[in-house]
Image (cartoon, grey):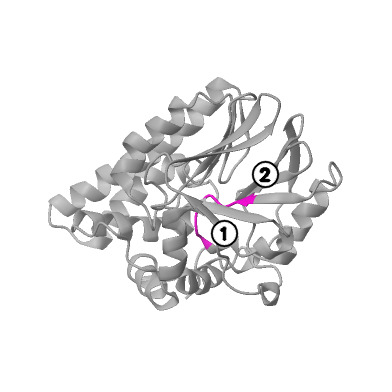
């Protein structure tokens, strides 16, 4: 048995962009995006990549533009591909939501093993990972990092969505938003640890309410312009709504999990099937929303064994 992403071994072309003076993003054909924001004598980095070796490659690109030290490393959520490269940054503080710290304690080891088996290409030199990444600063609703003058970086918890502890990084002066995996631009959503109904409604409403004119999603190209930002948020909401509609109908009809998966695949594949990680994510997405419909509010922990069981039940049978 092979997960859809376990056979994806080709390197992706990385695109470095300066979105505004001192504001940078690195995207890579559907791989997890990263970003950085310069302050007067420091840098804030957003996301850490899966290993220190992968992180150092991103930092090498960043050092072509600035030699300021990384004072803050902001983690949008707890997933291994976002956090395990943190040691490469030498950050004075690692910032995350309080729920992210809780989730690392509860399931960080299991998530590390699960994601490494699911997406091995992202774990470049896994032996370079020193251990779990622990936040040194946490918050619940909002945190502000002054950047000098009238500039500031606002970290916001818009509500439960991709995980219980997602945060976004908002630059009101530049109208630039780093949205983490709450929004994807022409990339499929992973919802295996999600709170689907909140994400599709109040959480995305709060993201949209910030009024971004440039958006860096968790994966996919940078959305530049208010229309492109609106489209990215709408696409993410539409994916969630269709997943909820199809799986919900199968559940209400007392169908099987396999019935729900097939209905969701039939509805989503024509629009999203060619986008990065669609086939890889959908079985886990369907299982999580089915659990929610069964009344399981807090996501069950994904382990390497449980991953194989769900994949075999929905993709290999």
**Rendering coords of residue 223 (x, y %):** 60, 31
The quadrant where residue 235 appears: top left
Task: Report, in whole angstroms, how far the alpha carbon at label 2 lies from the one at label 1.
Answer: 20 Å
Q: Residue 200 or 86: which is nearer the viewer?
A: 86
Q: Main secondary structure of the magenta part?
A: loop
Which residue is under mark 1?
136
Element under disc 2: strand
- Asked if residue 109 is positioned above or below residue 164 in the image, the reply reads below
Question: In the displayed structure, does residue 118 sit left or right of residue 93?
Answer: left
**Rendering coords of residue 175 (x, y %):** 60, 25
Question: In the displayed structure, does residue 19 sit left or right of residue 290?
Answer: right
Disc number for residue 178: none
Q: Residue 24 or 246: which is nearer the viewer?
A: 24
> Are there few (<14), some (14-19), or many (20+) residues within 10 Å of tag 2?
many
- Judge whether residue 168 can be spotted in this image: yes
Q: Of the residues tagged 2 and 1, which is closer to the observer?
A: 1
Which residue is under mark 2?
35
Residue found 57% across the figure and 65% down from its top:
119
Residue found 44% across the figure and 69% down from its top:
105
- Asked if residue 220 is positioned above or below residue 207 in the image, the reply reads below
The quadrant where residue 171 appears: top right
Image quadrant in which the C terminus is located = bottom left
Q: Earlier in the sequence, mark 2 or mark 1?
A: 2
Question: In the displayed structure, does residue 21 sit left or right of residue 172?
Answer: right
> Are there few (<14), some (14-19), or many (20+) residues within 10 Å of tag 1?
few
Q: Residue 169 or 194: which is nearer the viewer?
A: 169
Residue found 31% across the figure and 42% down from its top:
198
Q: Is residue 61 magenta?
A: no
The magenta segment is: 73-79
């Amino acid at each position: 048995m092979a997960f859809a992403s376990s056979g994806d071994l080709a390197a992706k072309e990385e695109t470095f962009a300066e979105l505004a003076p001192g504001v940078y993003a690195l995207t890579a054909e559907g791989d997890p995006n990263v970003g950085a924001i310069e302050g007067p004598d420091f840098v804030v980095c957003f996301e850490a990549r899966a290993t220190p070796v992968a992180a150092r490659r991103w930092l090498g690109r960043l050092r072509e533009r600035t030699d300021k030290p990384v004072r803050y490393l902001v983690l949008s959520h707890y997933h291994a591909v976002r956090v395990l490269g943190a040691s490469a940054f030498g950050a004075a503080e690692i910032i995350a939501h309080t729920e992210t710290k809780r989730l690392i304690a509860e399931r960080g080891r299991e998530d590390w093993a699960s994601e490494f088996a699911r997406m091995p290409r992202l774990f470049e030199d896994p032996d370079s990972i020193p251990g779990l990444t622990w936040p040194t600063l946490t918050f619940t609703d909002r945190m502000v990092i002054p950047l000098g003058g009238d500039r500031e970086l606002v970290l916001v918890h818009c509500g439960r969505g991709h995980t219980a502890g997602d945060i976004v990084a908002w630059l009101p002066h530049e109208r630039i938003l780093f949205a983490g995996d709450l929004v994807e631009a022409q990339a499929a959503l992973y919802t295996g640890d999600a709170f689907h109904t909140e994400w599709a409604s109040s959480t995305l409403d709060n993201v949209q309410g910030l009024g971004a004119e440039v958006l860096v999603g968790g994966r996919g190209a940078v959305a530049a312009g208010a229309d492109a930002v609106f489209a990215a948020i709408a696409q993410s909401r539409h994916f969630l709504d269709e997943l909820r509609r199809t799986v919900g109908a199968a559940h209400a009809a007392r169908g099987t999990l396999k019935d729900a998966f097939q209905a969701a695949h039939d509805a989503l594949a024509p629009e999203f099937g060619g986008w990065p990680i669609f086939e890889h994510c959908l079985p886990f997405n369907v299982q999580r929303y089915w659990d929610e419909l069964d009344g399981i509010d807090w996501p069950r922990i994904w382990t390497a064994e449980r991953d194989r069981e769900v994949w075999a039940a929905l993709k290999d049978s």
